[in-house]
Amino acid sequence: MAEKVLDMKKNVHDLATEFPEVIDIMIELGFKDISNPVALNTMGRVMTIPKGSQIKGIDLDSIVSLFEEKGFEVINVPELKKKEAAKTPEVKEESSKPTFDINKLNIPDFAKAYIREDGTVDVDKVPDFVKNFLDEDGRIDPSKLPSFMPGTEAKSEEKPVEEDAKKPKNASEREVLLRSYIERLTKGEELETVRAEFVENFKEVDALEIANAEQHLIRSGVPYQEVQKLCDVHSALFHGSTKQEKIMNAEKAVAASKEAAQRRMNGANDRKAAEIKAQALIAEPGHPLNVLTLENEGIAEQIAVINKLFEEGADRSVITDELNKLRDVSIHYAKKGDIIYTILKSRYDVTGPSDVMWTVDDEIRDELRRVTDGTLSDEEWLERSKAVVKRADEMLFKEANILFPICVQFFKDEEWEEVGRDLKEYDFCLLKEEPAEWEKASKEDYTHRAAKEGKNGAAGNDEVIFALGHMTPYQLEAMLNTIPLELTFVDHVDMNRYYNDNGEKKLFKRPISSLDREVYTCHPPTIEPMVRSIISSFKSGAQDKVEVWMNKGGSDVLVSYRAVRDANGEYVGTLECVQVMDEIMEHYKEKFQ
């Protein structure tokens, strides 16, 4: 019996995981999409080789033959049963089911992956949007396919369908269309082509609905890196030939949805009221939206300076100096990541901005660093510099017309007050003058909040008894705040429970609003897997500490993660220690010179 058994009932992802050479063999056969890790990780999880051969029109006998030549024993091949049946006299029977050809369905390939050869689907696995296309027998009904999909236009001599009738009619159909955009971009279609269609189909759609659709795509298994491509696509809603046109288009896009009137808007009864409220908050001196908007104006001014230098053909050194100033956007982006995104994600389960926009923020910040480090050729430097400045400019519109309206719809007054308090820990970004101090910003620390919530010992002075002594909470807090390290404690269920405060400016900001919140919500999607891996290794006992050296703010910094265990070795939580090492390194440098 062959050592390598290829089971045709298994999905392509599992086969490729079990036998990595399957990928090369399928590429040789003509399954080019399998070379894309995203396609393998999404469609590959529901696609079998027989189903793929039917969709791609690749002969299954040829597939089996090549795998056998490569040393595989191939089992559970549907066509083999037909061959055996062919050896006996053929008995013609009237088929009770209509003929079904999956190749004639005008739907994206990712949707075909869920459909069986006879047109039925597995209702327990199929996404909700595919269920919209089923008849009463659970089979795909081509007449129910969305009219906006390529190729579904009527081919008869009936009267032309009105343009509005071809557009997606509800949130479910719009989500299907967003999925098709991702697939097209993944296959290499030009961004501008997809953008044009997006504007046509989504110009009357509420910004929050788009964010929610992106969130659903990520939860359904589409990697956030792919959904992130939509972030650049839906910024097209805010494009125009002049700044005034951009603002006008943005205002139209945000104001369009009638369904938003039914959504809870923190006191706003309809979309127009939410817009009015947002503008009122932006106009309120010192309010978080006022500060963030003023910073965006400063960012826009700096971008205008750089773009003028591009137009004038200024020297690289002159432009690089201005690009270095633009790198201050990292301060502005940190405020969104540490405070805004995480409140939306942890309290309201609005994960679209944190999973998509946060990643774009990080990419802009990192790319600005690359174009100012002097390592790129002149041609590559100019191309990449213009591109990253354009992305930073588009982020201004995404904040004003997507992020800020979403915040207004969800944040309560006390949450804005928390944000106002936490923003005080950050520097201002590209502001010529400091904004007014917001009087409503919360002045309460965590002890006040805990006391309100009835947590024992929140404000008491009863002594805490240790194995080697005793202290009052007052003494204990003062001692922890004296330690020359930034300390963070995450408990055994991965919740942020404590930060110390030594009175000095923190390298890593720790908003009070992030306490009692899952630690993973405080990290961008690119970092979250590493955090999960570290904590998982602590829980399993595989590791007790992880140390990371980095340069932060011009200083050498050691970040040490340590598993906290009790006397019996049971995992209690994770301690993060951040220490500036400059003085220590200078001491030993002088000592050994």
Image: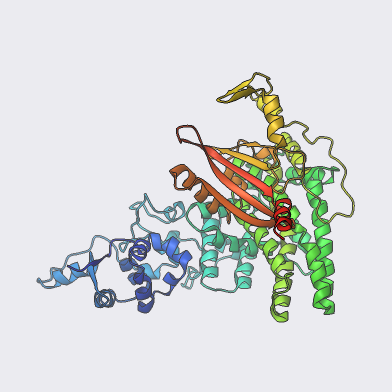
- Quadrant in which the N terminus is drawn: bottom left
Of all residues shown, which one is farthest toward the right?
433
Q: Which quarter of the picture shows residue 52?
A: bottom left
Relative depth, front residue between 171 and 546: 546
Q: Which residue is painted at 39% across and 74% down in the image?
A: 31
Q: Is residue 349 visible?
A: no
Is 316 located above or below residue 280 in the figure? Answer: below
Q: Which residue is painted at 88% across and 43% down in the image?
A: 436
Q: Is residue 2 left or right of residue 347?
A: left
Relative depth, front residue between 588 and 72: 588
- Quadrant in which the C terminus is drawn: bottom right
Specify the color scheme.
rainbow
Q: Which quarter of the picture shows residue 442?
A: top right
What percent of the width, then of the height, locates residue 476?
67, 28
What percent of the width, then of the height, locates residue 409?
68, 43
Q: Is residue 548 visible?
A: yes
Q: Which residue is painted at 70% across and 41% down in the image?
A: 511
What percent of the width, then of the height, locates residue 106?
44, 68
Q: Which residue is painted at 66% across and 27% down in the image?
A: 450
Of all residues shown, which one is farthest toward the left?
89
What percent of the width, then of the height, locates residue 408?
71, 43
Q: Is residue 155 left or right of residue 574?
A: left
Relative depth, front residue between 490 and 8: 490
Is 73 located above or below residue 480 in the figure? Answer: below
Q: How many marks?
A: 0
Q: Is residue 434 left or right of residue 103?
A: right
Q: Which quarter of the picture shows residue 85?
A: bottom left
Q: Is residue 253 left or right of residue 305?
A: left
